[in-house]
Amino acid sequence: MATPDPDKLMAKADKLTKLSFTRWTADWKNATSLYEQAAIGYRFRKDNEKAKEAFEKASKGQEMISSPWDAAKHMESAAALAKELGHWNEVSDFYRRASELYRECGRSQPASDALAKGASALEDAVPDEAVRLYTDACVILEEDGREQMAFDLYRAATSVYVKLERYADAATFLLRWGIAADKCHAVNSQCKAYLSAIIIYLYMHDFQQAQKCYNDCSQIGAFLSSDQSRCASKLFSAYEEGDVEEIKRVAQSSPITHLDHVIIRLARKLPTGDLKELNKEEAEEEVLDENDLT
Amino acid sequence: MSVIDILTRVDAICKKYERYDVEKLNADNVHGNDAFARLYASVESDIESALQKAEMAAGEKNRAAAVALNAEVRRTKARLLEEIPKLQRLAVKNVKGLSKEELATRSDLVLALPGRIQSIPDGSTNGSKQTESWTASRTEIRFDSTSDGRFESEYFQQTEESSQFRQEYEMRKMKQDQGLNIISEGLETLKNMAHDMNEELDRQVPLMDEIDTKVDKATSDLKNTNVRLKQTVNQLRSSRNFCIDIILLCVILGIAAYLYNVLKK
């Protein structure tokens, strides 16, 4: 059965599954193997549309014969083909379905991997959906207590956010990364995540937020006594003095150069905007306070 | 008679005949009527002793002892400065047997005294500079007092060679500092890399444990399968079956040879 026509196989398999007067129960087992062969044949012929359909049907067949693992695998193949075709919503649907099937098997890692694959496929086309997929993948791993594996996902999601210029979301996501790192006692990653969040706030030219973030993170003992917090405090003092050279020097310093390259690029662009504005803002606020008191 | 006995006897005799010691009496009475002269003499002797103490303090290596000596000098100076007004009053008083010029010179002497007293070095003129530098360097831990490079005070004197030597020392220190900076940068990079590797390894530990259990299960399954296979093969390999196999093989070879011969013709 090396090169039978995939169309013929498909037709045969369809016949096996379609219930009719002569057939009372669908023969899913044979049908599934036929569907698989047909799908492989189509893929070999580079007929992506038909191959995708064949994989979908094969996956359904596997579900029917209660082997969710194989079903999930076929779903992934279908999704990869959908990506080639550019049917983005199908891509996300298929990957989500595959992830659910993996979760049925009780295997969280492949589930989150499926979502991650979907997210990386959709990064360019539908970045919002990609971010949602990344978030769900992180949630799956965290539920299972395997936060260590989620670090790469956090990194990828942050870079997508930064590409979309949604810096506040990026910073929030980094703080979530910090929480995950804290749970698995990865102190270095935690401190790096906090420093990255502070840098993003400074890049957004939101000095107050950055300060608040730094103060919050300083509550954590591990961060307070780390290189990263020292670097952050140097940055803040340079900002307060309005010393551009000092800011650039701190941005070249060692703790920042060991962060993710996306963050390094942002740090190199600091300071954004006018430093004197920051100080003027603070002075204005003080004047208002005095008026309120008197 | 031993030396000690001689000494004791000499002391006793001296004490008995003290009244007849003309020199001592003269020394005591030389200023007997002159209160000014007496006071002046005592002030002079105090100044002398203070100067001596100041010299000792300057050469003193032990900082605590130097500080103590300086404190004593300062106390003496303060006391002497208090005596000066009294001296001035006495200087004006006219004493028997004193010429007019002497009277004038006395007041001059008294006026000169405060200057002399103030000029006694007690470490306080340089002390202010030192305290400043101490406060400045309090943030840094210093074990070597010569490393701060302040060699202008009178405690240190320079010759040409020693200043050259010190310059060389400063240059070398600068080069060492540069080298140490480079080393520290490299070490920081190493530290960051090591931290990342640490976390990566931590991440892989549970994975390795999983692999371990799975592989253990696979090996035990394989062992079981092998044992069963061995039993099956042993059963199959009983001698009767083996002979039948060989006979059949020979038969087939014979048939093949016959056919070959037939076809060759």
Image (spheres, coloured by chain):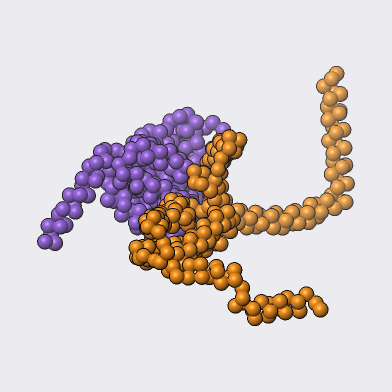
Q: Report whether residue A234 is seen.
A: yes
* Percent x, y of residue A231: 42, 47
Q: Can you tell which chain is drawn orange?
A: B
Measuring 30% from the left and 41% from the top, which residue is drawn there? Answer: A242
Image height check: is A131 above or below B109? above
Q: Quadrant of the N terminus of chain B?
A: bottom right
Q: Report whether residue B118 is seen.
A: no
Q: Tally the marks.
A: 0
Please state which of residues B97 and A196 is positioned toward the viewer in this rendering: B97
**Colour assignment, chain A:** purple
Please state which of residues A120 and A66 is positioned toward the viewer in this rendering: A120
* Percent x, y of residue B123: 48, 55
Q: Is residue B152 left or right of residue A173?
A: right
* Percent x, y of residue A288: 14, 54
Q: Quadrant of the C terminus of chain B?
A: top right
Please state which of residues B93 and A259 is positioned toward the viewer in this rendering: B93
Measuring 72% from the left and 58% from the top, which residue is drawn there? Answer: B224
Could you say which quadrant of the image residue A127 lies in? top left
Q: Is residue A203 left or right of residue A23?
A: left
Measuring 59% from the left and 71% from the top, which residue is drawn there? Answer: B22
Measuring 37% from the left and 63% from the top, which residue is drawn there? Answer: B91
- Residue lying at the far top in this picture: please name it: B265
Please state which of residues A179 and A264 is positioned toward the viewer in this rendering: A264
Could you say which quadrant of the image residue B249 lies in? top right
* Percent x, y of residue B54: 52, 57
